[in-house]
Amino acid sequence: DMSTDPQDNLQPLLGDMLRDDASLDEFLAARAESEFDLMRLTWQALNLLLLAFAAALISGYAIKLQRRLAPRLGSSHARYRSGFRATLDRLADSGLSREFGESREAFAQRCGNCAPTMMTLTRAHLGAALSRKDNAAAAARADVLAPDWRSLENAVNDELRKAVPLWRLLLGALNPFSWLAAR
């Protein structure tokens, strides 16, 4: 049917077919290289996905490590906050985290079976946090009367090690996102 014009992309193909087989093979090879390579795109997407997964794992472990080292490396006036947060992270590693709407005191009482010192640490933390917001004089008194934060945190950690099975502690240590459960 000559009523329609031939398509532009078919004219070179028909010309190569009329000449010889070698030029037809070259034409087909050139078209195959320029076409969309789905397999290569799939591998690139898979590599990108693995890279994103690795970045998420590294970020999770970095945040977890930073939160655990903050009490030792941070400033002393924020020790009550960073130490309490690190203790909450350790509790989350062992499977204990605050429920939605649960107060700090109720959570410490619930943790009393496996870590009785948590109630003392919670009361000390709340006392320090609330006294620092009022005024500088109250903050100075709180610093003088402040408990030994490290000994309280170590006591809670020791009680956790004794009460929680080792496999649960190891599983929590391997989880890079357990700090998200600490509230």
Image: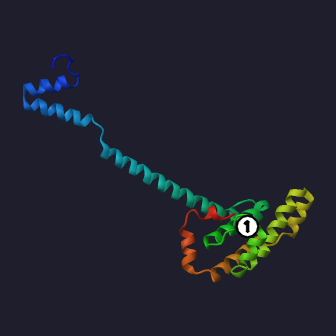
Toward the viewer: 164 or 79?
164
Toward the viewer: 53 or 95?
95
Within the image, what quadrant is residue 137 found in? bottom right
- Number of dots carrying numbers: 1
What is the residue that sits farthest to the right in this orientation? 137
Residue lying at 65% horizontally and 62% vertically, measured from the top left: 67
Residue indicated by mark 1: 84
Looking at the image, residue 157 lies above or below residue 181: below
Name the quadrant of the N terminus. top left
* Residue type pointed to by label 1: Phe
Name the quadrant of the C terminus. bottom right
Position of residue 134 measured from the top left corner of the image (x, y, whole percent): 89, 57
Residue lying at 75% horizontally and 59% vertically, measured from the top left: 75
Position of residue 136 measured from the top left corner of the image (x, y, whole percent): 90, 57
What is the residue that sits farthest to the bottom in this orientation? 162
Residue lying at 22% horizontally and 22% vertically, measured from the top left: 7
Q: Residues within 10 Å of mark 1 (few under 14, many from 20)?
A: many
Within the image, what quadrant is residue 74 found in? bottom right
Residue lying at 90% horizontally and 65% vertically, measured from the top left: 141
